[in-house]
Image (cartoon, helix red, strand yellow):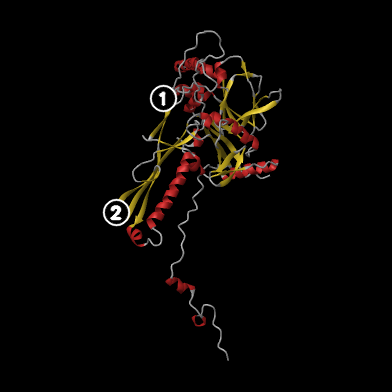
Amino acid sequence: MTSPVGKPGDEKSQLSLGTAAARQLTTTTKSQPQMQGISSRWLLKLLPWVQVSGGTFRLNRRLSYTLGDGRVSFVNTGAKVQVIPQELTELPLLRGFDDVEALTALANRFEQKEYKPGEIITEAGKEADSICLIAHGKVEKIGKGKYGDESVIGFLADGDHYSYEVLLESQDYWQYTVKAVTYCTVLILQQSSFESVVALSPSLQKHVEQFKARRHKKTDGTGEAAIELSAGHHGEPVLPGTYVDYETSPREYELAVAQTVLQIHTRVADLFNDPMNQTQEQLRLTVEALKERKEHELINNREFGLLHNADLKQRIHTRSGPPTPDDMDELLATVWKEPSFFLAHPRAIAAFGQECNRRGIYPTSVEMHGNMVPAWRGIPIVSCNKIPISDTRTSSIILMRAGEKNQGVIGLHQAGIPDEIEPSFNVRFMGINEKAIISYLVSTYFSTAVLVPDALGILESVEIGRME
């Protein structure tokens, strides 16, 4: 009789050495520690970096008489919406005005109105007698085309405003129609209400008169102080005298910092370094995390981030929600001088591809750093997962002209700092504490600057994931 066959795992039936035991006599092949959070970081690769030796970069520009045109903020109590008085200084008319009492009086005179999609807010040809603040929603500006037909000439959304000029003039008329695209909440200040507050406030009266005087100063087409020139003349006419005026208080960018303290126990650093050095691997992953944070700050930082430093005139909105070829063309029109690349969230790029497919358009691809990336009109569209997606599933697409010689967008850093491992990136030994833990301070210094406003454009309210 034959002996019974042992069950799997029974030691008596095993005829050779098992892998569990064999592993005790061999060294497994290992990978370096992997990190899912590492992205392509195209912005860090493509942004030209300028050396800032003193830690601060001063951006000198020609003097401009184009005053602020920022967005206005609001507060709401239930359905009631009010403009924050100090936020009225974002209007060009009130920029630099600091009389809180007068600002509060103006804020209290605004009337709240609600509009449904398709309703007219102001109509071309009718008397213009108010300023409108878009508290919530999206509107379109409709004007006359070249051949007399109606065409959309622009969009406004949350925080935008229009028609502050009518408060300074009498018997003027709307030059375009403004119509609600979505449900909108609009705050409206009548010209008569504005004039009554001005009459009661000597400080506001003086400020308005000074603003009117500045409006009449001569500027060129970009809003900068004009340079007097003469051309096409004959004989010996008296040539105009001129000089190039500069901003007296130019903006300064101080290098920001991203830092962390890397901690490693001496026992790990001493004993567990074969085949991979534990300290080097810990440092490598820490540096990768700091680079990810660096790109995030370059996009989102409220002081110098690209999303917050684009000129308001360089911000446009999508026509219908998803990013269409028409929207991308309009964005190109805002950065028309030698645009370098688009920057978009991968889902926004996918949404644009879907819109192209829907129209039977097939964008080309271009080669960048050994990779093929999609392009529109020959301009690369590179991905950046640091551009946020809002709760309403909307994002932004950035277009920029890069480089100092092109008067574009530049990165700022300082190479040559102590204990440097990469330009403007250093690791400094901090000592060993009583628990035998080694500490290293890992730092990177950086910022970004937009040299002239038309170097950066943003397509906002980009809807992604629309289901048909």
Total number of numbered discs in the rendering: 2
> Are the residues flagged by discs 1 and 2 in contact, CB closer than 8 Å?
no
Q: Is label 2 in a helix, a strand or a loop?
A: loop
Decide: few, some or many residues near mark 1? Use Cα within 10 Å; few <14, some 14-19, many ≥20: few
Q: Is residue 283 visible?
A: yes
Q: Nearer the viewer, residue 332 or 83?
A: 332
**Foreground tag (1 vs 2):** 1
Q: Is residue 318 visible?
A: no
Decide: few, some or many residues near mark 2? Use Cα within 10 Å; few <14, some 14-19, many ≥20: few
Q: Quadrant of residue 51?
A: top left
Q: Nearer the viewer, residue 239 or 7?
A: 239
Amino acid type indicated by mark 1:
Ser
The circle on residue 433 is 2
Q: Can you give x and y, in whole percent of width and height, for residue 67 in the image?
A: 49, 23
Position of the N terminus by quadrant: bottom right
Q: Can you give x and y, in whole percent of width and height, for residue 136 in the image?
A: 57, 33
The circle on residue 249 is 1
Task: Name which of mark 1 and mark 2 comes first in the sequence.
Answer: 1
Q: Can you give x and y, in whole percent of width and height, for residue 468 in the image?
A: 68, 44
